């Protein structure tokens, strides 16, 4: 069985990675359609050994093509408008933007954590925020075992998370150029405690996404969570300091074992030999890396974790393709109607 696939935002940072990951995983594709803005119409992109021509995304793009799965990563405005159009033409949309994540009847899915949510979809499945994805892969087994009470997130996020323009701001900054396309301040040799827009409560939207999406994915709205998200001069790979407080007591070795056998998690935690996760080693990997695992000695039952993953892979493209693979699995085993 093969499927017709559409990529919306095919020329972008995540769009190109969708193609790479689909090819690596030998996703069963019949036809693949690539869409982007009018600026890119006619651009050729090589995929599975063949040249594909990018088309301008329009309201009729999904007509008559029998698209089974549409992977979107062209920003929230594009998703708000075009995801329902694609869904109404019969596609299952897997959307990487923030447009649909918090809608009640839209599943927000990380396949290692809550794959069964896919079964409730009504045409759109949301891919969570990059920083949230890597956190919940690690937090899920801990929540199941020790019941999390409170989480404090502090992030160190790569420029590629802000798309091609963010990437170029760092690259140009390294070359000594002063012009910026994306960030409000130079990012080279700097840290910017400002990702997405500021909200009335003083938090950024990125921080509120981490807080709200974590609760939705773990299915627990009683969790107390706070976050500070920071852009750092790293090209690929988000790092996160995660402080967690549990209801139950835990044994540190058992906790480490639990993480080591969790799907999608790799423990790198050998401080004596200078081994801990870092973005340069997470780049182009699909797993989430965790280290610096140590007791928070300031509370009765708490732990500190250092969590790193490739934000364009597990934080975006890989997670979306894993969702697509699950959708196909559910279609083929009859759990999900097509
Ligand atoms: P284009 O390259 O034609 O601008 P990134 O996050 O790396 O900046 O990528 C954004 C992606 O979203 C690109 O593929 C971009 O296409 C696409 N995009 C942006 N605006 C639109 C739009 N109005 N319609 C379709 N695709 C869009």
Image (cartoon, helix red, strand yellow):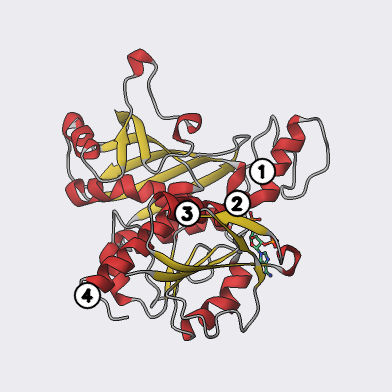
- Please report contact status of discs 2 and 1: CB closer than 8 Å, yes or no: yes
Residue 332: image quadrant is bottom left
Residues 159 and 85: in front is: 85
Q: CA distance from mark 3 to mark 2?
A: 9 Å
How packed is label 4: few (under 14 Cα within 10 Å), some, or many (20 or more)?
A: few
Q: Is residue 89 above or below residue 233?
A: below
First reached walking from the N terminus: tag 3 or tag 2: 2
Q: Nearer the viewer, mark 4 or mark 1?
A: 4
Q: CA distance from mark 2 to mark 1?
A: 9 Å
- Please report contact status of discs 4 and 3: CB closer than 8 Å, yes or no: no
Label 2 within 8 A of ligand 1 by Cβ: yes
Q: Is residue 297 above or below residue 140?
A: above
Which residue in the protein does label 3 denote? 317
How packed is label 3: few (under 14 Cα within 10 Å), some, or many (20 or more)?
A: many
Q: Secondary structure at mark 4?
A: loop
Image quarter for ligand 1 equals: bottom right
Residue occupying the far front of the picture: 50
Q: CA distance from mark 4 to mark 3?
A: 24 Å
């Amino acid at each position: 069985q093969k499927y017709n696939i559409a990529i919306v935002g095919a020329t972008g940072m995540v769009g190109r990675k969708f193609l790479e990951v689909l090819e690596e995983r030998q996703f069963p594709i019949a036809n693949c359609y690539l869409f982007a803005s009018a600026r890119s119409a006619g651009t050729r992109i090589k995929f599975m050994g063949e040249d594909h021509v990018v088309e301008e995304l329009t309201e009729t793009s999904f007509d008559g093509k029998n698209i089974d799965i549409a992977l979107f990563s062209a920003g929230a405005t594009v998703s708000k408008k075009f995801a329902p159009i694609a869904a109404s033409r019969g596609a299952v949309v897997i959307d990487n933007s923030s447009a649909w994540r918090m809608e009640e009847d839209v599943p927000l899915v990380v396949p290692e954590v809550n794959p069964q949510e896919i079964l409730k979809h009504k045409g759109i499945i949301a891919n969570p925020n990059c920083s949230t994805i890597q956190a919940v892969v690690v937090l899920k087994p801990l929540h199941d075992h020790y019941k999390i009470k409170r989480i404090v997130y502090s992030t160190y996020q790569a420029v590629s998370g802000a798309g091609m323009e963010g990437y170029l701001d760092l690259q140009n900054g390294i070359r000594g150029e002063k012009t910026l396309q994306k960030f409000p301040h130079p990012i080279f040799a700097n840290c910017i405690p400002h990702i997405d827009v500021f909200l009335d409560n003083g938090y950024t939207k990125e921080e509120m996404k981490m807080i709200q999406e974590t609760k939705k994915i773990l299915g627990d709205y009683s969790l107390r969570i706070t976050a500070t998200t920071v852009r750092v001069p790293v090209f690929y790979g988000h790092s996160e300091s995660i402080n967690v407080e549990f209801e139950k007591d835990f044994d540190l070795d058992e906790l480490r074992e639990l993480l080591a056998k969790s799907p999608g998690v790799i423990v790198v935690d050998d401080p004596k030999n200078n081994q801990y996760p870092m973005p340069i080693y997470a780049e182009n990997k699909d797993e989430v890396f965790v280290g610096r695992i140590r007791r928070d000695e300031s509370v009765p039952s708490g732990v500190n974790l250092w969590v790193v993953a490739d934000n364009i892979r597990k934080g975006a493209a890989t997670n979306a393709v894993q969702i697509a693979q699950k959708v196909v699995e559910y279609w083929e085993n009859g759990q999900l109607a097509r």
